[in-house]
Image (cartoon, rainbow, N blue to C red):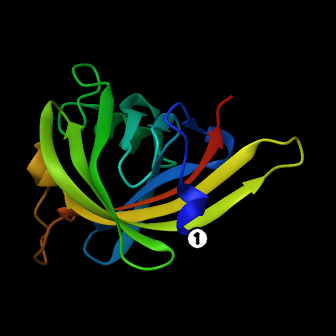
Amino acid sequence: METAILTSTNTKWALDLSHSELMFRVKHLMISDVKGYFRSFSAEIQGENLMTSTIRASIDATSIFTNDASRDGHLKGPDFFDVEQYPEITFESTSFRKTDDENYILSGQLTMRGITRPVTLQAEFGGVNKDPWGNEKAAFAVHGKINRKDWGLNWNAALEAGGVLVSDDVRISAEIQLVKQS
């Protein structure tokens, strides 16, 4: 399986957005999860070997979608992502370490609201295959957890019965399909 993810020096893999998704979940009222998505994002890998190549991702923070226009507006505002000042969220890998045949640890720098912090995520390599049109595709499932307050997303409200409206922990989940560029 190791050779399946080797690439040549000039190889570039770009995100196939129509076959990818980026989701997050947070606890609401401390009793249930609320999910949201970023509808617009990009990712690319360029280099000789995935294990040593840099993975870059860019997320359009204005594309946040939680199926509630009022909540989306609040999340885009200064209490959370402040998209007028910080319209982009970025990630750049610093290491990609294999833990077994299909699983990896992806470490990198995540930048939100002008704050850059290290993150560690789990990645599962789905494999490489060609679609019916001859395009070579590679797939990964990526997941992890961050504390939103590390990036200045501090807004919350205390609950009458105790606890808070929104958890500090944010679970991130991505299904990523990349297409090899000619």
Whether residue 144 is visible, yes or no, is yes
Closest to the observer, 99 or 139: 99
Taking the image as shown, residue 94 lies to the left or right of residue 131, namely left
Instruction: For residue 154, say whether it is visible.
Output: no
Q: Is residue 78 left or right of residue 63?
A: left
Q: Is residue 22 left or right of residue 1?
A: left
SS at mark 1? loop
In the displayed structure, 96 sits above or below 180; it is: below
Question: Quarter of the image containing the N terminus?
Answer: bottom right
Give the x, y percent position of residue 67: 52, 48
Q: Hey, which quadrant is residue 53 in on the image? A: top left
The amino acid marked with disc number 1 is: Met
Q: Nearer the viewer, residue 5 or 23?
A: 5
Seen at 46% across and 33% down, the residue is 63
Task: Pick the quarter of the image with the C terminus.
Answer: top right
Question: Closest to the observer: 60 or 99?
Answer: 99
138 horizontally vs 154: left or right = right
| Image location of residue 178, percent across then percent down | 60, 45
Count of numbered labels shown in the rendering:
1
Question: Residue 34: where, in percent of width, then height?
Answer: 40, 63
Residue drawn at x 29%, y 40% as measured from the top left: 92
The vertical placement of 10 against 25, above or below, is above
Residue placed under numbered mark 1 in the picture = 1
The residue at the far top in this view is: 84
**Which residue is painted at 32% across and 28% down in the image?**
88
Residue at image location 13% in from the left, 78% down from the top: 161
User: Whole-percent x and y of residue 103?
Assistant: 44, 73
Q: Nearer the viewer, residue 149 or 52?
A: 52
Q: How packed is label 1: few (under 14 Cα within 10 Å), some, or many (20 or more)?
A: few
